[in-house]
């Protein structure tokens, strides 16, 4: 039976199935160094409205091809659940005995899950102790997925040739990816906000040192900004996407690009407002523990101007995260990356390969 957790010390293939691309990374760690064994990615050329079954089949086909062509060692993999299939909910409960917790969580989630009475796989992460009007409470993050969706996902990936040893969520992988940078005693209490801006969603993840204490998925990402640009310019969605990609790659900001970026202001403000609501919730839970910094990851984090705009609105120091900082890269890996600077889009795949654990 596939579990939500994974053991460390093995060279797993981390498989990140994004809505717009497939990324696979396999790293090996030792006492001396961390190195890339294999790295591969492929685009998924489907419109945002494509049926999820069609998208999963396209993703599985690319996984099968990359396994054959990219030199991965073995087939053991840790995979992330697609964002659209995962339900994340912070919950506060009184301290109860361990055997009482599952039934209490089920009661709390009644009527809140986006699927009906389907069998559900559920896990929880204990964030810590908080103090509310009712007194001392347990703050936890509940992760749920419909059993049917999980089985379809696992079946497709197994047919693609993967030996799946663990399943996880992207938020856990993000924190695991950067946990190696938070090993000093002074890092234990530092609150770091990770903002993962992808094509179809934005993930808001808060970590205290190397421990995740909050996660939430926002249904806004690069696709929403493409749609906003297409509407304002009265052009096809594919053309708007190409225009925005050109803006990302531009080294010099022209007046025309300034005007285009202003057309995205409403969507950027909406994303920032949603992130702010998440932070306000966290402030009420974790008093006297202010967020110290923001780390941007995900494919959209290559747009430094977008990241700067969000960071300025949040009034927080920020940086673009590099999940491969300090990692030895082969010539094949460097060719796949095609860049010498930070590689924020690879955070989930790297975290999964390192053995991200949910429990």
Image (spheres, grey):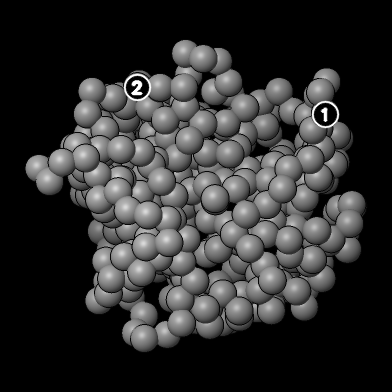
**Residue ID at (73%, 43%):** 8
**Residue ID at (54%, 50%):** 359
Q: Which of the 4 image quadrants contains residue 341?
A: top right
Sort mark 2 into few (<14), some (14-19) or many (20+) by Cα contacts within 10 Å: few
Mark closest to the chain's N terminus, 2 or 1: 1
Label ID, residue 293: none
Q: Secondary structure at mark 2?
A: strand
Left or right: 339 in relation to 244:
right
- 336 or 85: nearer the viewer: 85
Sort mark 1 into few (<14), some (14-19) or many (20+) by Cα contacts within 10 Å: few
Where does label 2 land, which residue? Answer: 292
**Residue ID at (56%, 74%):** 150
Q: Are marks 2 and 1 in contact (CB under 8 Å)?
A: no
Q: Position of residue 283 (x, y in %)?
A: 22, 34
Label ID, residue 30: 1
Left or right: 130 in relation to 256:
left
Residue 314 higher or lower than 186, as above or below: below
Residue 188 higher or lower than 155, as above or below: above
- Label 2 vs label 1: CA separation? 31 Å
**Residue ID at (61%, 79%):** 151
How many numbered dots are placed on residues in this image?
2
């Amino acid at each position: 039976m596939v579990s939500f957790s994974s053991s460390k010390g093995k060279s797993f293939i981390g498989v990140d199935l994004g809505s717009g691309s497939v990324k696979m990374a396999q790293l090996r760690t030792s006492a001396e160094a961390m190195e890339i064994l294999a790295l591969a990615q492929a685009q998924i050329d489907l419109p945002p409205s494509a049926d999820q079954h069609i998208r999963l089949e396209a993703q599985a086909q690319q996984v099968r091809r990359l396994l054959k062509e990219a030199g991965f060692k073995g087939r053991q993999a840790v995979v992330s659940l697609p964002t659209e299939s995962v339900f994340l909910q912070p919950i506060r409960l009184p301290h109860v005995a361990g055997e009482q917790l599952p039934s209490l969580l089920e009661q709390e989630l009644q009527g809140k899950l986006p699927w009906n009475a389907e069998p559900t796989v559920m896990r929880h992460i204990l964030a810590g102790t908080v103090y509310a009007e009712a007194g001392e409470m347990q703050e936890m993050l509940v992760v749920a997925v419909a059993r049917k969706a999980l089985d379809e996902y696992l079946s497709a990936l197994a047919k693609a040739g993967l030996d799946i040893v663990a399943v996880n969520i992207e938020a856990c992988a993000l924190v695991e990816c950067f946990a190696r940078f938070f090993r000093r005693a002074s890092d234990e209490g530092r609150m770091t906000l990770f903002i993962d801006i992808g094509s179809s969603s934005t993930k808001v993840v808060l970590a205290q040192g190397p421990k995740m204490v909050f996660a939430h998925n926002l249904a806004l990402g690069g696709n929403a900004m493409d749609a906003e640009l297409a509407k304002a310019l009265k052009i096809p969605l594919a053309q708007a996407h190409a225009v925005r990609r050109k803006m990302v790659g531009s080294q010099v900001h022209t007046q025309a690009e300034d005007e285009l970026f202003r057309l995205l202001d409403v969507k950027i403000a909406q994303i920032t407002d949603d992130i702010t609501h998440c932070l306000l919730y966290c402030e009420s839970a974790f008093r006297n523990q202010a967020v110290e910094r923001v780390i941007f990851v995900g494919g959209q984090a290559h747009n430094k101007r977008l990241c700067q705009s969000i960071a300025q609105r949040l009034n927080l120091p920020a940086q673009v995260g590099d999940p491969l900082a300090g990692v030895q890269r082969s010539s094949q890996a460097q060719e796949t990356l095609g860049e010498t600077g930070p590689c924020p889009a690879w955070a989930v795949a790297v975290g999964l390969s390192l053995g991200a654990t949910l429990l």
